[in-house]
Amino acid sequence: MSISLDEVRHIAALARLGISEERARVAAVELSSILEHMQVLSKVAGADMSANTERGMMLRPDTGPPIPLERPPIDFAPSMRDGFFLVPRLETHEDSQEGA
Amino acid sequence: MSVRETATRDMSATGIVSAYEMVVGLEVHVQLLTRTKAFCLCATDFGAPPNTNVCPVCLGLPGALPVLSDHVVDLAVRAATALDCRIHERSVFARKNYFYPDLPKGYQISQYDRPLATQGRLTVENVAGDPESTVRITRVHIEEDAGKSIHDRFAAASAIDLNRAGVPLIEIVTEPDIRSAAAAGAFLRALKQLLEYLEVSDVSMEEGSVRVDANVSARPVGATTLGTKTELKNLNSFSAVERALDSEFARQCDLLARGQRVVQQTMLWDGGSSSVRPARSKEESHDYRYFPDPDLPPLVVASDRVERVRRHLPELPATRRTRYREAFGLSAYDADVLTASKSLGDYFEDCARLHRDPKIVANWVMGAVRAALNVSKREIEDFPLRPADLAELLDLVAHETVSGTAAKRIFALMLETNRGATEIAEREGLLQVRDDSALRDWIDQVIAEHEHEAARCANGERKLLGVLVGFVMKKSKGSADPRRVSQLLAERLGV
Amino acid sequence: MTQSARQAVDAAFQRANAVRAGADGLNAILWSDAKAAHNEAAEVDHRIAKGDVGALAGVPIVVKDNIATIGSPTTCGSRILEGYHSPFEATAIRRLRDAGAVLIAKTNLDEFAMGSSTEFSAFGRTRHPLDPALVPGGSSGGSAAAVAAGITRVGLGSETGGSVRQPAAFCGVVGVKPTYGRVSRFGLIAFASSLDQIGVFGTTVDDAAAVMHVIAGHDPRDATSVDAPVPDYREQRSDLDGVVIGRPREYFPDQLDPPIAELCHRALDHFRELGATVRDVSLPNTELAIPAYYIIAPAEASSNLARFDGVRYGLRVTDHGLRGMYEATRSKGFGPEVTRRILLGTYVLSAGYYDAYYATAMRARTLITRDFDDVFGSDVDVLFTPTTPTPAFAAGAKSDPYEMYMSDIFTVTANLAGIPAISLPIGRVGGLPVGGQLLAPHFGEGRMFAVARALESALGSEAHR
Ligand SMILES: [Mg+2]
Ligand SMILES: [Zn+2]
């Protein structure tokens, strides 16, 4: 199984990693060779493992107080104004609907 | 687009719409009424200064971990139960991965291939003529909300407020069972009513506690396969949903009629121009890379938990309507009106518990009270006359302490002055007067002022008696007892 | 204790200076503050004076820099968190402080704990205390080196695939990885959430067990932490009569370094002499471990590290628009190994590949877990294996990523199965420490420590010869 340069560009974009062309080329080779070693897994592909044995999660009551912040966001935020985190102006409305 | 094209489009659209059938499925996000956020202990209340209801968890700080609130589970199970869903004993939280500044962790905790509940239905009464229609519910799952991005506050920057980040939601997804914009509206109103009754959410589109997306496609009438759908977003009210559906349906019909294809895409509703436009497409197609959230073991909802929720399920609209008909002997119409919103029904019941005649209470609530609400643009919750105040007034009428006419004035004055019915009746002299001497004085004055009519009445024009009684009532500002007045008048005129 | 907390802490700093633990020397320590630590120790002495003697009263401790602490930076050895001070503290740290321990340093690590050599720290590699040309192992190499150099007797690290046991073996100290869910992950900056656990280094098994006893136990702030009682970890056994020790054949391959195999057999002989039965067993799916691990861990990491986006904290590099800011921040902020694993993890989760990779790897994980259930179900008490296939290697020796990944070959299985494991020194090869590993059933730490102690005392000074 080998990863193409385009696939590397695609996943780098998904992961918001700005990587240079040559870094992408190297990555394509590295990742392909790593995935070579994963072939051994093909023997268990498809095997049904649906064992619902895992413990269910513990829930908590619907009451505070929240875990305190020893220091307010303004202390660690790269850019803040009037209590808001600031980021470069966003383009599309579609973006803001993403994942709703 | 040129004027001519617009014209032809409109013509063709209206012309061919009838040849196609609208097919709609809805995705409704509803905010749950919890004190704390879904996975952290921050308060959910709105209006707090930006980024003050935040903690390490909902800020997505390194090392923080989510822990789910049991109340979120109970409310979600309550909603799913009321929607007749199958509730799965084991469901799984997944991470929906995408980058957006108001999504602190870079992923949304949601449910994907193993949701809390599936295969439900909601029956919507009398939609567009037909008696009732059932919309199948595909799934109900739990997820967390994102924060807020404000784009118009600062010049070159967007402002991020994470107070809302992590607020618990349920997403309700329907099958494509809806066949008209009106039916979509009816479904949403029925759903809103149901969720209000369940006290699962306050279901207010204005406050953003409900969000609706609609998938719509068109197909030739009689066809059984589905056409290509588009997704409608930015629907900020139920009526916007209806208008957007009609306009998008017309657009699709027009395309199909010209033999063109509908492109599967997201369309945005623009309330201003009452039209839809395609959302700008992104650089790379969405690939959310869902996988089970390793921070959260499977959610196990044991059958006894479901039973407990089921047992404590509040009365639902349909049940209440029947009860109003049977217990209070109200007409089907009155029962519908009074149960339309839970709070109006509660008001009616509280009052009916205090005043012996439920029909009278129903008439006043549906008449005077609703009229007053419309005028004052107020919700029943903050209507100044509480059920006890109204009951006091209705008791006065029942005991004939005040007349029906006087009651209307007292009601108005109660709203103005916030004083009790009895107090107003006394201060305004509206207590019904049965003392004959007082009545006779008014009668004498009326006869003096209307000699002519009095004479004609005395000479046998009996119908004028009513008129004269009316004059007396007016003089008494409605406080006179009309029956006694007409007796005395009759004696006085010898008729 | 005869020594006051202040004396112990001051002694630790003297030792740190003597061995040159800082950037100019071992580069094991990324942050320390002698004055602050001294004052904290003074408070502990005050508590002791008032009769409040915690289990670790006055014990100086070093902590891996991917565990959130207050009063010191928490950087994960990454540019993206350079200078970041956490506004909250890990549960394990709070428990240590409550028990009277004094945090004296935050230690170096492979960036975000991704590595097996502590070469991949944005702040320079950590050097092996015995030979600066060698790596101390990783990713918790800073804590391992600090304890091995005698700066403190105990330290915290974190485990995802062997990041405590492997450096412990390389440096000749004891390293413990608890049962998954035994120690709260709250405040441990996630690499791969389903595998991560905070682990402990100790000069001796007793040291490590004492710290583990303090940090173990349920934490309502971690939904994966298990609400099970914490037994006494001090159980001593003069003999191992009736104890069955499994020797998994897959961990003793023919190509295993002969001297290492020899030291293992010597250890197994000691077990026999102590009255234990040594039984050959098989864990047939072991070969799936590294491939499964290097799919699951990067997949989870790609999601866990999405929060480092320059919006709310940490590094922000501005470029064209939001998209530019994201990409500049993350490419400048993350080093090559982290970038490689994020790419790998994003790939195996992306549309069309999920089933072929992630889903399949999860199946392999289940099979590996069942292997252990089977052997422990057939009255085997603990398993004994070498901790690593080789002793400490030279910096830069492993240029091929997968070759580096293979150094976890004997340790990743415990993380995949969620079982506890311990590495302790069993001797030396060419002057370099070699570790032996004990693997125990879920929540079998008590028995595991007892067997480790027995071996430790049986080996005596042999362990470091
Ligand atoms: Mg959703
Ligand atoms: Zn919070």
Image (tube, grey):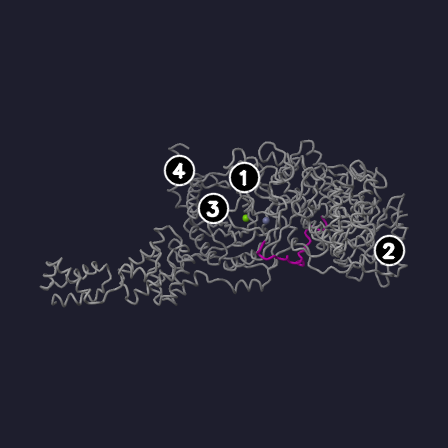
**Residue C12, how many percent across, how many down?**
80, 45
Instruction: Work out how far the residue at label 2 is from the one at label 3, CA to CA, in angstroms.
Output: 71 Å
Q: Are marks 1 and 2 on the same chain?
A: no
Mark 2, other Cα within 10 Å: few <14 / some 14–19 / many ≥20: many
In terms of sequence position, does the residue under pointer 4 or pointer 3 come before the other? 4
Q: Secondary structure at mark 2?
A: helix
Count of picture labels: 4
Q: Nearer the viewer, mark 1 or mark 3?
A: 1
Q: Looking at the rendered structure, which numbered label has been put on residue A82?
A: 1
The answer to whether residue C379 is above or below residue C307 is: below
Q: Amino acid at mark 2?
A: Leu
Label 4, residues with CA under 10 Å away: few <14, some 14-19, many ≥20: some
Residue annotated with mark 4: B9
List x then y, in percent, for residue B133: 43, 56
Host chain of mark 3: B
Disc 3, ligand 1: is the CB inside 8 Å? no
